[in-house]
Amino acid sequence: MRWVTWTGGICWMMAWAVSVAVGMQDGSLRKWPHVDQLPVQRELPDLLRMFDGRRIETAERWRKERRPELIELIQHYMYGYAAPPPGITARITKDEAVVANGKGRLREVEIRFRDLPDEAPRIHLALIVPREAKGPVPVFLALNKCGNVEILPDEAITFFPQAWRHEGCPPQLRGSQTEFWCVEYLLSRGYGFATFHESDIDPDKHDFSDGIHPWYRLPGPPETHWGTIAAWAWGLQRAVDYLVTDPLVDPNRICLIGHSRRGKTALLAAALDERVALVVPHQSGTGGVALSRDSTQETVERINRVFPHWFNDMFTHFNDKVERLPFDQHALVALVAPRPLLDTEGSQDHWANFPRALDALRAADPVYKLLGTRGIQGTGLVQDDEPIVGPNFGTIMQYRLNEKHTLNRKYWEKILDFADASLQKR
C-alpha cells in the first residue's frame, strides 16, 4: 500500500473558483434574476451572446467571459453549485492483481477528501490497464450503477456489501455487466478503464442526509445547492484528481463515459473540467445532450417530478416555463469545446430524444468553430455500420445504432474508433 497526496494546484483551484462564482463579492454569489424575470426565449439562446446582450466574437472572450458565465448559469438554474475542490489523499489498497482473463492489471485506490473526518464518504476506485502496456495508457472513467464488481467476474475486484444499491441491481452482482462495459475489449485496444460506484458519492434517492451533501456547507440559497448529478460529477472530478497522478495513466487522455443518468453526469463533469480529453454521454436524454425546449419525450416537469434529487430546486421553476431558461443543453456541449464529444444513441431508444440531441450538437457547432476545431462535419450523424472516420467525422458528432437503452460491444467499437482518431493530436 502507498499514499498519494494531491494538492490540486493553486492556479487550477483559483481558476475553478472564479469559474463557478463569477461576480463573487464578500463571499456571496452573483445575483441572477428570478425565473419570472427572465426573458421568454422560444428559440435556443445564442451561445455567442452574453446574458447582458453583448456579442462574443473571439475565442479569447469566449474563454474569459462567456464560458465562465455559462458555467454559473447552468449551476445556478439547473445543476446546483458544488463544493470547491477539497484536495485528496489517495491510498492504493490493491495492486498488480491479474484480471480479465490475464489481459488486465487491477489497481484499487481509496480516495479521501482532505479535511473531512474518517466517517465521511470516500471513493473506491478500480483501475484496470492492459497488463502488457509499456507506458501510460488512455483511460475511460465511468460511474457504475451497482458496484465495481459488476464490470468483470474476477474475484480480485473488491466487493463493498455496505453500499446502497438500486432495487434493479441483480442479486448476483459480480460480472453482471461484463457485456455492458466490455473491459476486455478496451484492454485489447490499448485503453484502460476506471470506475467507482455512484453511491460512494451519493445514493441515487431523494435524500440528502447521506452521501457527500451534508459534509459541505455551501453559500447562497439552498435551492441553488448541488443535486445528485452535480455531486456525481464532482466525484468524477475527484477521481480525475487521482488519475492525473497515476503513472499507469496518460494524464492527457482521460476520457469520460456514462449511460443514461450517468451520461448526464459525464457531460456535466466534462463541461466543468478541462482536464477531461474526450467525453461520451451515452443515451443521456433530457438533462444530458437532448434539448429541453420542444421536447416530445421526457419533459423538464416529468424529470423533476420523478427524479426530484437529480437537479437543484431552482430547476423546478422551469417545469412549465422552459422557454425562460437562459440556456439549453447545447450550452453543455459548447462548454466541452474544443474537446471531442461523441453523442451515442439508440434508434429504438426514443425516450432519450436523439433528434433533439443532434440539434444540440449542431447548435453548439459555432463555438467549436470559433475555437478552431472541425466541429460538425457534414450531417454530424453516423449510423449502424457506417465508419466513424468518414465525411461526417468531426470534433462533435452523433453515432446512432439500431439498439435499445443499453451499452454493448457494437457501441464500444465505434466509441474507440472515435477516440483513436480524436486523441491522436493530444
Image (spheres, rainbow, N blue to C red):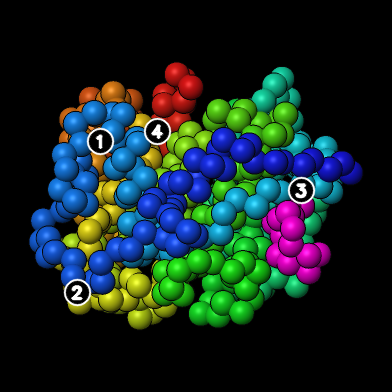
Q: Is residue 1 left or right of residue 390?
A: right
**CA–CA distance in space, label 1 to label 4:** 11 Å
Q: Is residue 209 left or right of residue 55?
A: right
Local packing at callout 4 (Cα closer than 10 Å; few below 14, some 14-19, many 20+) is many
Q: Nearer the viewer, residue 2 or 418?
A: 2
Q: Earlier in the sequence, mark 2 or mark 1?
A: 2
Give SS at disc 1. helix
**Which residue, given by chain and number where applicable, does mark 3 sit on?**
89
**Which residue, given by chain and number where applicable, does mark 4 sit on?**
339
Q: Is residue 209 magenta?
A: no
Going by the picture, which residue comes out furthest to the right?
1
Q: Is residue 122 magenta?
A: yes
**Which residue, given by chain and number where applicable, does mark 2 sit on?**
36
Q: Position of residue 238 (x, y in %)?
A: 62, 49
Q: Is residue 367 left or right of residue 107?
A: left
User: In the figure, residue 32 lies in which quadrant?
Assistant: bottom left
Q: Residue at x 18, y 70 (%)?
A: 37
Q: Earlier in the sequence, mark 1 or mark 4?
A: 4
**Which residue, given by chain and number where applicable, does mark 1 sit on?**
367
Q: Which mark is residue 206?
A: none
**CA–CA distance in space, label 3 to label 4:** 28 Å
Magenta residues, start to end = 110-124
Q: Position of residue 396 (x, y in %)?
A: 31, 36
**CA–CA distance in space, label 2 to label 4:** 35 Å
Q: Amino acid at mark 1?
A: Val
Q: Residue at x 57, y 54 (%)?
A: 84
Q: Amino acid at mark 3?
A: Thr
Q: Nearer the viewer, residue 140 or 25?
A: 25
Looking at the rendered image, the disc whose residue lies closer to the viewer, 1 or 4, is 1
Q: Nearer the viewer, residue 59 or 334?
A: 59
